[in-house]
Image (spheres, grey):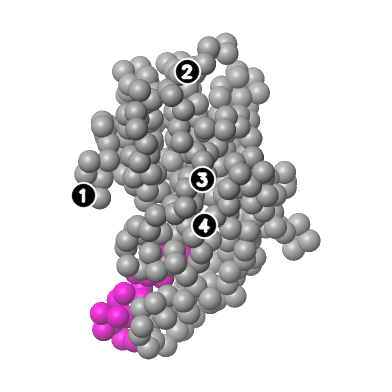
Amino acid sequence: MTTVLVTGAAGFCATHLARRLREFEGLRLVGLDRREPDGAHVGLWNEFAVADIGDEAVLQGLLRSTRPDWVLHLAGQTIGSHDELFAANEQGTRSVIGAVQAQVPGAAVLVVGSAAEYGVVDATDLPVREDQPCRPSSDYGRSKLGATQFALEAWRRAGTRVAVARPFNVIGAGVPPHLVVGALIKRLKRVVAGDGGVLRVGRLDTQRDFIAVDDLVDAYIGILRGEHWGEIMNVCSGVPTSIGTVVDTLVRIAAVTVRVEVDPSLVRADDVLVSYGSGEKARRLLGCSPTIGLERSLEQAWRGTTMASAPCSVVPGTGEVRADPH
């Protein structure tokens, strides 16, 4: 029996991850989040603990009692003050890895970083590769970079079996409103419900790299199964798409007539104009590429339904833990 612990387990990506893992036999799924799971999580978890990863005593006790073989660290915070972001993202990652080292040093750990770690990248350096120097332009990006650096140092200095995934812009059923597509869907549904017929948006010319959440979680599983310790791996489509294209596609899916207006209050001063990644490393090491296109994943997000992706060969192992490297 392989035990898998997922932090941030009540969140958007973790819900899809748990559903994907449920397709495999011989897995015991343990969720950890600081909030209670909602109805979408019924039947997904064998055990669920409500606690903050910053509570090191509780965290270490949970690892000691559950003895996970895999730890997928999805917990984090995207908005908040400087101190809140660094506490949740960098210090939270330090707590998780420290607990693993103390209680289950043979466990495999996936730390979920962010494309925001790259910051502003010159057009000549696009698509951005994993060895691109990071110059994050936001506290969120800086806090995630700190988490990545600590994770890689844990591998180099202590032999902790840890890898880092850097997802780009994630979309799919249940996408939350703090992400750009989730925010657009929330506003568009208000328009559909009769709220004035005007869709207010930020910049339409910014370009982002969108990845379907079902492709994303397959990559997470593949990174752990492939034992790519000490590696950073982009999880992306490799295709830049303008926010204007996303808006047009959502309006077409919604089948409504709306007037789109740029709202200056939604334009961020630190917005990166163009950001998209190279998925070459993931293709080479994992042997798979994204299978769900933009329109299909946007339709999935709009309708709130999950569409199965064509899975990569990422079936988890037998649960055998290798000898402690320490």
Residues at circles 2 and 4 in contact by the CB criterion of under 8 Å: no
Residue 26 position in % (x across, y down): 34, 28
Looking at the rendered image, the disc whose residue lies closer to the viewer, 3 or 2, is 3
Q: Earlier in the sequence, mark 4 or mark 1?
A: 1
Mark in front: 1 vs 2: 2
Residue segment shown in magenta: 178-197
User: Mark 1 and mark 4 in contact (Cβ < 8 Å)?
Assistant: no
Q: Please give the residue where the numbered disc 1 appears in the rendered image.
A: 39
Closer to the chain start, of discs 1 and 2, is 1
Per the image, label 3 sits on a secondary structure element best described as loop
Number of disc labels: 4
What residue type is disc 1 on? Gly
Residue at horizontal 32 percent and vertical 67 percent from the top? 303
Q: Quadrant of the C terminus?
A: top right
Label 1: which secondary element: helix
Structural distance between the alpha carbons of marks 1 and 2: 33 Å
- Residue 150 is drawn in which quadrant? top right
Inspect the magenta stretch and tell me whether residue 179 lies in it: yes
Local packing at callout 3 (Cα closer than 10 Å; few below 14, some 14-19, many 20+) is: some
Q: Residue at image x 53%, y 77%?
A: 244
Q: CA distance from mark 4 to mark 1?
A: 28 Å
Q: Is residue 8 magenta?
A: no
Q: Callout 2 environment at 10 Å: few (<14), some (14 to 19), or many (20+)?
A: some
- Residue displayed at 59% across by 75% down: 205
**Amino acid under disc 2:** Val
User: Which labelled disc corresponds to residue 312?
Assistant: 3
User: Is 97 drawn above or below residue 77 in the view shown?
Assistant: above
Residue bearing mark 2:
321
Q: Is residue 138 visible?
A: no
Residue annotated with mark 4: 291
Q: Secondary structure at mark 4?
A: loop
Mark 2 vs mark 4, CA separation in Å = 31 Å
